[in-house]
Amino acid sequence: MWFFRVVDGLWALFPVVLAVLAVRPVSDRELRQFTDRYGLEHTAETVPAVTRSVRRGRTGRLACAALGLSLYPVLYDLGLTIPNQSAFYGFTGYLLGAFVTALVPGMPRGEARRASLVPRTPGDYLPGTALVMPAVAVAVSTVAVLVYDFEPRRAFADFHGTADGLALTAVAVVATFIAVRTVVARPQPLTTPGLVAIDDAVRTQAVHTLAGAGIAVALLGTSACLFEMGGYASPEWLQITGLVAGIGALTGTVAAWTFRRSPWHVERSTLQ
Amino acid sequence: MIVSVDPGSPVPPFEQLRMAIRQLVATGALPVGSRLPTVRQLAADLGLAPGTVGRAFRELEVEGIIESRGRHGTHVKSAPKRPQSAERSRRIRDAATAYAAVVAELAIDPDTAIDHVRRALNY
């Protein structure tokens, strides 16, 4: 019994630890990582704005993770019972926090009514691969579902799969498209060139987070479609194709998630 | 390629924006073929209503300075035609007279006033 009490006690400490980590000061290492990633210089103007942005993102993610971890015990004390999946709620909270902080504007609105006549497009913030990947994911998922449904020689003729993978991919792609466009269209505080560069860096980080997460989820749906197609197909070559392509899509999921932290310099910043 | 709108000016915001874009095209800062931001983006950046920016774009389109290419966005079509020599002289004289009146009203030193003109002309 004592063992479970210790585990419970440690588990209860998690949200506290996360809350402490969320509000700790931004270190020089974190600052340098951000400025190096987005090609910013360390100046009196950039450091406070970058510090605010890094702290805001971290607080959003970790505070939501702490809330997720506390969800089950808090609701239990209030008399509401939900499945005891605290780790899942914590992870979901972390992702939700990342999503919300990326979507909500973090830069103060400039007082001056000034604007650049250079259009902002998703292509300024994302590589070509990330721009075409959502369409590829939907196309591959659709083909996999169609092949699965119409492949005449499949081993389990009575078994009918679902299009859940395709639905997940489609929803993720639409949500990503809307979220990325929202962030790109956000007003730009055009008071000084330094502030424009910081705004572009913060916007890039937000777009990368949203696109990385969205594409990761979309490819997860694609891999589900491909595994289902390969798993229930009759011809051996189709089984192998489904398996290999499914593993490829899963690898793409991991790559898309890690892509959100890749370096990126907005060319437009230098043109303003 | 920065445009600004002064909310305190007696000139309506759409007219300020129209004149700013017209000037950028006339001086070549905004070359023919350049793509302009969407009405929504420009309105959000300037803190104006989309209708205000839309009106400036429509008037520039009527003048033949910009053209809308549907999904491909709005582009600079051609530079505004330069007026004839006599017309140019008359307009610059009128502008100088109006400026001189403001200088006199504010009791600004003539050298300072000319410095302001030089700065505005980027000299």
Image: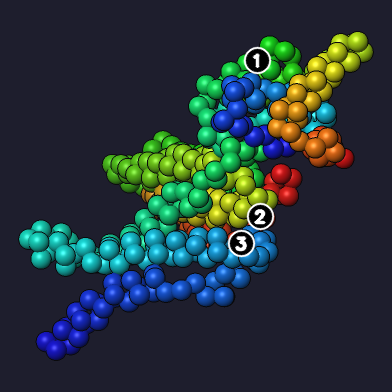
Give the residue at the far bottom of this rendering. Answer: A2
* Disc 3 secondary structure class: helix
Nearest to N terminus: mark 3 or mark 2: 3
Callout 3–callout 2 Cβ contact below 8 Å: yes
Q: Which residue is mark 2?
A: A194
Displayed quadrant of residue B10: top right
Please state which amino acid type lies under the numbered disc 3.
Thr
**Label 2, label 1: how many angstroms apart (C-alpha)?**
34 Å
* Disc 1 secondary structure class: helix
Residue at horizontal 66 percent and vertical 67 percent from the top = A42
Marked residue chain, label 2: A
A106 to the left or right of A191: left
Q: Quadrant of the N terminus of chain A?
A: bottom left
The mark total stands at 3
Residue at horizontal 9 percent and vertical 61 percent from the top = A78
A64 to the left or right of A195: left
Label ID, residue B59:
1
Marked residue chain, label 3: A
- Both labels 1 and 3 in a single chain: no
Q: Position of residue A83 (x, y in %)?
A: 17, 61
Label ID, residue A46:
3
Q: Position of residue B84 (x, y in %)?
A: 90, 11
* Disc 2 secondary structure class: helix
Q: Position of residue B32 (x, y in %)?
A: 80, 26
Q: Position of residue B88 (x, y in %)?
A: 87, 15
Please state which amino acid type lies under the numbered disc 2.
Gly
Residue A163 vertical position relative to residue B97 in the rendered view, above or below: below
- Both labels 3 and 2 in a single chain: yes
